[in-house]
Amino acid sequence: MIKYIIEGGQELHGGVTISGAKNAAVAILPATLLVEGKCHIENVPDISDVRLLLEILNDMGAQIRRLTPNALEIDCTRVRNTTAPIDLVRRIRASYYLLGAQLGRFGHARNAMPGGCNFGLRPIDQHIKGFEALGAVVEQSGGYVTCDAPEDGLKGGRVYLDIVSVGATMNILLAACLAEGTTTIENCAKEPHIVDLANFLNSMGARISGAGTDVIKVRGVKSLRGGSYSIIPDQIEAGTYMAAVSAAGGSVTIKNIIPKHLDCITAKLREMGMVIREDGDCLHMEKTRRLKRANVKTMPYPGFPTDMQPQIAVCMAMANGTSIVTEGIYDNRFRYTAELNRMGAHVQVEGKAAVIDGVRELHGCEVRACDLRAGAAMVIAALAAEGTTIIEDAHYIERGYEDIIGKLTALGANIKRIETFDPQPAVAGVG
């Protein structure tokens, strides 16, 4: 078990460099299965979700070489089409990208239903709809999903997504790259990590157009070759540090970003009173007064991201006035509010909305990280709170934030990581 201990009440000052995008990396790594030859990938975040995917690829026979802490060489030329270990698959939501990549390369894929953070029903019906539009036969039974292409291979088709789904958009891209003919995906998600996946595949020889719009066309090619690629900076990590400065106070330069990806977050924090200045691939942030109330509704990109909802809620919890957060993507993403209320916040959840009456200060106590972004919210609240906060289940946080302890410490935070082990011995005779 991993826990964080944070002494709050310290302003943040200095600079922080943003790592590669988690949501891009967890799709690009499975995408290397489609490539014959060596993929040289830079700006890979060193996070637990990435390490899990590398373990799965290694188990399949990929040759992986770490060139630097954030650069990898991956050669999947000789991989075997195997079922990924169920214990690994169930620890990471992005394991479903293995289905699209294996189906695209081998014509067959079988994996357990994915795991990851639990904040509501997240079915993969739109993924399956896309695979079936390419001619695949898909079955779900016994907790597994099995996909089989016809004997003459996948064929291009037309897919209209019933809902805007990031995962389905990316998974269909993976399956369609090597399919014969043209695949058209309509009502696509437009997130930056979708564009990044398409750019990676194109750099390896794919023919994808329209990524970043609501219609993507994939013209199938016979093979993908090796090459080099650098993953984009993480929009959500950057937004999390922006929220941390907004809640805890101080003056921080956030480096290695793409400002356009942060427009909706920047606009909302400016509305709340933060002083923010763009300078190339950096943002300079300064808190000069108490935050003002605001309203947020999460929406698909370019709207306000659901992955930033818990973090902005912490800022609102300390703002002057009553704010409302409406969740437009997931059904159950407010579990963290009970933990926030234990720290002195006044948050009332009503269906898909949270009404937040701002307080002047939070106080430290023992809380838990309910999921990745809820855990980030608890860190932000702890930084801003008076006294000591202990965050249990902090392993969730490390799924998506590289070296969060080191980065926050460099900004002046007082934060420690403690790892403990279950003291209970195994029972003799029980396997």
Image (tube, grey):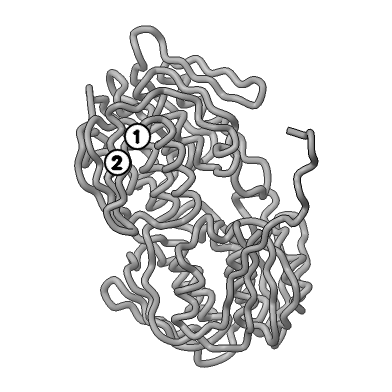
The residue pinned by badge 2 equals: 74
Q: What secondary structure is marked by label 1?
A: loop
Task: Name the residue type under label 1.
Answer: Ala
Left/right placement of residue 35 relative to residue 25 reads left
The residue pinned by badge 1 equals: 62
Q: Nearer the viewer, residue 258 or 82?
A: 82
In the image, residue 380 sits, relative to residue 165, either above or below, namely below
The CA distance from mark 1 to mark 2 is: 7 Å
Say which label, 1 or 2, has the lower sequence index.
1
Q: Position of residue 213 (x, y in %)?
A: 36, 45
- Corner quadrant of residue 339: bottom right
Marks 2 and 1: in contact by CB < 8 Å? yes
Looking at the image, which residue is at 35% across and 27% down? Answer: 79
Q: Residue furthest front?
A: 428
Q: Residue furthest bottom?
A: 288
In the image, residue 410 sits, relative to residue 39, either above or below, namely below
